[in-house]
Amino acid sequence: RFFGTKWAMFLAVGIYALFVSSNYWERYYTLVPSAVAIGMVIVPLWASMGTYITRMAQKYYEYVNYKEEQERQRAPRDACNAYIIVFQTIFYSFFHLSFVCAQMPMVFFLNNYLYQLNHTLFAVKHCGTLSHGTLPGFNKTVLQSLPRSVNLIIVESVLMAAAFLAMLVVLVLCGAAYRPMEEIDMRSIGWGNIFQLPFKHMRDYRLRHLFPLFIYSGFEVLFVCTGFSLNYGVCSLGLERLAYLLMAYGFSASACSSLALCMLRLRRHILLLVGAFIHAVLLVMLFCWAPEPRYLPHAPLLYSIAAFWGTGSALNKTGISILLGMLYKKKERQDFIFTIYHWWQALAIFTVYLWSGLPMKAKLSIMLLTLVVAVGTYLWMERKVARNVEVRLPRIPRPRHKTRGYRYLEDSSDETGSDGDGDKEDNDRHPTEATSEDEPKEDGEQ
């Protein structure tokens, strides 16, 4: 809220670039601080991206459907849902390709220096559901020889170029999500309120019921990149095929993100339930399967599991973001909602690292239990929404403007700019800001 949505994205991507640059001189005093910095900005980055995409969908709806003479008309309820679906689908289709692009250095560079699986997996006795921890017995001497420094610099320079390109795209192509006065209003509610309001929104039963789904969303994406890829994929196929396994996941997730467009015709819970069902079947299958170490004929099955897991992940990630955009259309709340979502997701990812030493059966059991609870609470939430159960939302304080000095005005405004005019603003909102009569009321409202 201090920098604005666009500049928060720009600064967060810049810190990602800082993390990449630390690899030019790999020391603890360069890698650790940059890793801490990237951990600090990951939730703000994703929260600002979720807010930005939702706001752009709403603004595009205004641009397409409202002319100057219609500006004072009330927007139909749920009118911008179709644009939220399309915008989130496009974003996640491109985002999941990052899993593919991330494997390019390994495919074109590192694979030339790796030992074959008979060396790295020589002492591995158990794979899959019989394994404990992270691939016990794996030979950590994986490189036949060290790559030349020039080659490492070339790879790191390509990554730096991609990071700078991302910064330029945000800087040049992304417009402001809010008008100047709106951004000032959002900042001026006070730092204490800004940090408290995301957690106060947990009073809303919709967020409380979606909380297990947020947790599972963090579990599943890291499990496929660590637990499944190492204890099933690498254990059976060797480290040299890890990149292709994750590429199968990324391509599938990218392609299947487009299935979210079915929400334009189907009820919104169907795709989330389909994604959950796919993951439940795969979790049960993985729980019962222990592939043989160093057994290449398992490759087609492992690639298929990775692809189906990508399908479930695509429906999960895209569906949750679309759902939050549909449930919380008021622009004053969207950044708080997406912050809570990605905060819980980040905690879940951290938890996956903590349980890395557990038996694989314990990990799969925890994930399956979390998935069942998440589906149950989500369906309960949808039932309450269908019955129009009253929602309790925290009251957002009115902006506290300074009584002296310059004050920005709304476009085409004739107001002289005093704090006493704040009560009039609710009657002069843009069409998409107008709420229907059954919009959830804030705490303290009658």
Image (spheres, rainbow, N blue to C red):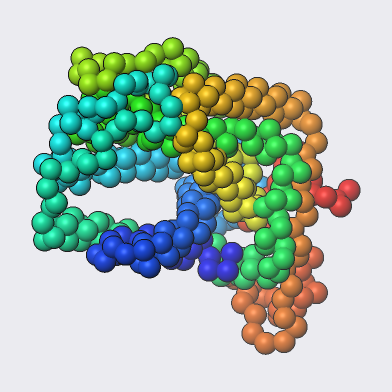
In terms of image quadrants, where is residue 170? bottom left
| Residue visible at 76% across and 47% down in the picture | 393
Viewer-side residue, 109 vs 26: 26
| Residue 311 sits above or below residue 438 on the image | above
| Residue 322 sits above or below residue 340 on the image | above
x and y, in percent, of residue 230 in the image: 33, 31
Which of the image's four quarters has the N terminus? bottom right
Viewer-side residue, 4 vs 24: 24
| Residue visible at 72% across and 44% down in the picture | 202
* Left or right side of 261 for 270: right
| Residue 170 sits above or below residue 51 on the image | below
In terms of image quadrants, where is residue 436? top right
Inspect this view and state whether residue 11 appears: yes
| Residue visible at 27% across and 27% down in the picture | 123
Inspect this view and state whether residue 301 appears: no
x and y, in percent, of residue 119 in the image: 18, 31
x and y, in percent, of residue 102 in the image: 28, 45
* Left or right side of 165 for 359: right
| Residue 50 sits above or below residue 216 on the image | below
x and y, in percent, of residue 400 in the image: 74, 72
> Which residue sits furthest bottom?
405
> Which residue sits furthest right?
446
| Residue visible at 63% across and 52% down in the picture | 336
Viewer-side residue, 415 vs 340: 340
Viewer-side residue, 439 vs 298: 298
